[in-house]
Image (cartoon, rainbow, N blue to C red):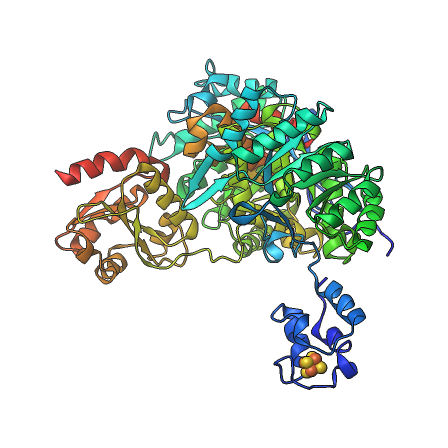
Amino acid sequence: MDFKAPVESFAGSVREVSIGSGAKTVKIGGENRLAYSPFDEGSTPNPPRLALEVWDMAPEDWPESTTAPFADVLSDPVKWAQKCVDYGADMVCLRLVSTDPSTKNAPAEAAAQTAKQVAQAIKVPLIVCGSGDEKKDAEVLPKVAEACSGESLLIGPAVKENFEPIAKACQEHGHSIIAQSPLDINLMKELSIKLSKVFPADRIVIDPLSSALGYGMEYSFTIMERTKQTGVAFKDAMTQMPIIADLAAESWKTKEAKSDEKQGILWEGITAVSLLLAGANLAVLRHPDSLKLVSDTLR
Amino acid sequence: MAVKGTDIVKKLPDLGKKNCKECGFPTCFAFAMKLASGGATLDKCPHLSPEVTEELEDALSPAIKLVTVGTGDNALQVGNEEVVFRHDKTYVHPTGIGLLISDTEDSAKVDEKIKKISDLQFDVVGINLKADLLALKCDSGKKDTFLALVDKVCKSTGVPFMLICEDADILLAARDICADRRPLLYPVTKNNIDKIIPAIKEKPGPLGVKADSLEELIPLTTRLKEEKIDEVVIDPGSKDLMEAINDQTFIRRAAIKQGFRPLGYPTIAFPGTLAKGELKEILVASALVIKFAAVLILTDFDEFGLRPLLMQRLNIYTDPRMPLSVEEKLYAVGEPGETSPVLITTNWALTYFIVSAEIESSKVSSWLLVKEAEGLGVLTAWAAGKFNGDSIAPFLKRSGVEDKTKTRKLVIPGKVARIKGELEDALPGWEIIVGPREATEITGFLPGYAAKLKN
Ligand code: SF4
C-alpha cells in the first residue's frame, strides 16, 4: 500500500477584514484552509493576531500578577495602550468598563472621547468593546463610532438585541463590527444573517464567546473549529467571517489563574493556543508574558 | 475507515449464504452486521478458514491500534481513536502525559520526580487528574547506571514507564529486569529493528518506533506487522512544533480517512525537544494534546504547569455529545445536612459545573437547586422568563429540599437580585439572600454565610 500524503483542499474561504486606517492597517482572515495547516492547498494570507486589553478605568479585581506589568499606567488608558504596543501587541482592545450601569455608569460621550484619544495615540489598530450591558452599549458604541470616524476600529460586542444602532453608526463611520452570540453555532449564523442585511459582511468579525480553560473552553473550541470547517470546507457564507477569541477576562477570572502567576500565564496561554488552533483569527489577552509565550509558540 | 457489514458478509462461508446459525445469529448476514458494529467476535463462526479469519481480523481492527503500557489499574491505554475532529464524534483515550527521568540526574532529583508523578493529583468536579507515566532515559551510556535507575523506579512506584536508550543491548537488558511491567521500549529504528524483533517475540510488549520522517516510519511498522508485532506507538521525528502539527495531522488523516494501516498507530512526541523553557514546553504540549499526540513526554513539570495541561486534556477529551444542560433537580454538593446553605442556579451545563466546582472548592457542603431553564445562563434565563418567582417557587416545592433541610434561606445569583421580592412573595416562609454576581465569588461568600446560618 503506497502512502499518499493526505493533503486537503477546500472550496470556501474566510472573508478578509481590515482593521485600522492608513499605515496601521492590519488584516485578519482571508484564508481558504483550516488553522495552522500550511501543508494543505490554499493560502493563509494573514497570521492570527494577538491583542492586549486596556480598561478605561483602573481595575479593582485583577490579580496582582496582571496589574504589575502596567502598574504605573493603570489609570491612564492612553499610556496603558502605548505600553501594550511596547509589549508587542498587534492590536489593543480598549474595554469601556466605566460605562457599566451597575458600576460607574460613565456617560457615553466621555467614553467615546477616551476611545478617540487611545485610537490616535497608538500605532496599531484599536478594538473597542462596550461593558457588555446591551442597552448601554447601544448608546455608547454609536458614540464611539462617531467620535472615531475614519479610524476603522473594530467595535463590539453587537448582540441580537442591540446590533441595529451599532451597525448603523459603524456603517456610517467606516468601522468593523464584532457580532457576539452565546456559544451556539446556529445563534451565531442567525445573527450573521440579520446583521449582514444591514451591514457589509466583509466588516463582520464573529465572537462565539470564549470560555476559559476548565470552564467550558471545549465548547468555544469546538464551535470555532466547526465554524471554520463549515465556512472553508462547506462554503457556508454566514460562517465565513474571521473569529475573535476574547479570552482575557474569562481566563483571569478563574481561581486557578488568580492563585499563581505562572499558572495564570499558562491558563491564559493554553486557552489562547487552543482557540487559535481551533481557528480564531484574533485573540485578546491580558498578560504581556502570555502574549509573548503564545506568539513564540505559534509563529 | 470502518468496514461495512455488507462487505464482511461476502467473506463468510458460501458467500454468506450458509446460514447454519452456529454463531448464535439467525443468518450469516446478521452475524456480519454485528461484527461490523463491534457487537460480536469472529471466533463465534466455526467455519472460517485461517486466511479469511486473518483478513477479516485486519479489516475489523480499529483504524488506530489500541496500545497498553504498564499493567493493572495503572496501565495507560492510548489509540483506538476514530475521528479527526472531536465534533465528529469524540476522542476516546486521553493523551498520556509522561515525566522524563535521565540516568544522569542526581538521586535527589530522581526521588523528587518519582514523588511528583504520584503526588501531583488534582480533583476537578469529582474527576481525578494526574500524569500517567515515567520515561526513563539512558544518557550515561552505561548499562549499570541505567539498570540501577530502572530497578529503583520499578521498586518504588506502580506507574507505567517507558525505557529510552539508543543502545539496543542496554535497552533490552533494562527491559529484561522489568518485562512483567510491560514497559514501552523506545526507540526502535532502522538500525536496531533486527535486534529488537526476536527479543519482542520472546517477551511481547509495546514498542516506540522512531524515524526521521513519516515516510521512513512506514517500512518499519510494515516490517513489525509482518512479524506480527503491532503494539506500537510511532514518532515521526518532528523538528519543531509546526512540523509536528503537520506530521501528527497527516498520521491521523492517513489512519482515519485513508485507512492506511502502516500509520494506524498512536503517536508519541517530546515537547522539550520542540521548545525550550518550562512554560513554553507546557504550551507546546498543549498544542499537541489538540493535534492528536497520544503520548507526550515532558522533561519536567510542576504543579503550575501540569494542572492547566491536564485540565486542557480533560476539556478536549470530554465527549462533545454530552448535553449542554443538566437535569433539573436538587443536587448535593459535598455532604450537606439540615443546616447547610441552599443555593439556586440554572441548568446550563457550564453554569452548573462552574457553580458546583466553586461550592466544592469553598469546602462548604451545600444544597444546589438546578432549575430547568432550557440550558440558558442565569441572566438570559431570567430575561426569557424561565428563572423568576413564578417558575422557581413550584420547582423548589417539588424538589424536596424542604424535607432535607431546616434552612429556609435561599441564595440566588447576584445577577438576578431583582427577583428577590417576587420570590419572597411566591415562597412564604423563605428568606431570599442575594448571593455573588460571579460564580468565582462563591468561595469568598459561602464560608462566612454558612457560619452565620449555623448561629
Ligand atoms: S456460524 Fe458462520 S456460517 Fe454459520 S450462520 Fe454464523 S456466520 Fe454463517
Residue B233: x and y in percent read 71, 45
Which quadrant is home to the C terminus of chain A? top right
Which quadrant is home to the N terminus of chain A? bottom right
Q: Quadrant of residue A46?
A: top right
Looking at the image, which residue is at 70% across and 40% down? B185
Looking at the image, which residue is at 76% across and 58% down? B259
Looking at the image, which residue is at 46% across and 36% down? B121
The quarter of the rendering in which ligand 1 is drawn is bottom right
Residue B199: x and y in percent read 76, 44
* B132 sits left or right of A258 in the view: right
Nearer to me, B309 or A269: B309
Query: In the rendered view, would you say A294 is above or below B344?
Result: above
Residue A234: x and y in percent read 70, 57
Residue B211: x and y in percent read 80, 39
Nearer to me, A173 or B261: B261
Q: Number of callouts in the render?
A: 0
Looking at the image, which residue is at 21% across and 52% down? B423
Residue A123 visible in image: yes
Nearer to me, A24 or A74: A74
Query: In the rendered view, would you say B242 is above or below A88?
Result: below
Residue A208 visible in image: no
Q: Quadrant of residue B80?
A: bottom right
Q: Residue lying farthest right?
A: A2
Query: In the rendered view, would you say B31 is above or below B293?
Result: below
* B451 sits left or right of B138 in the view: left
* B288 sits left or right of A62 in the view: right
Nearer to me, A172 or B315: B315
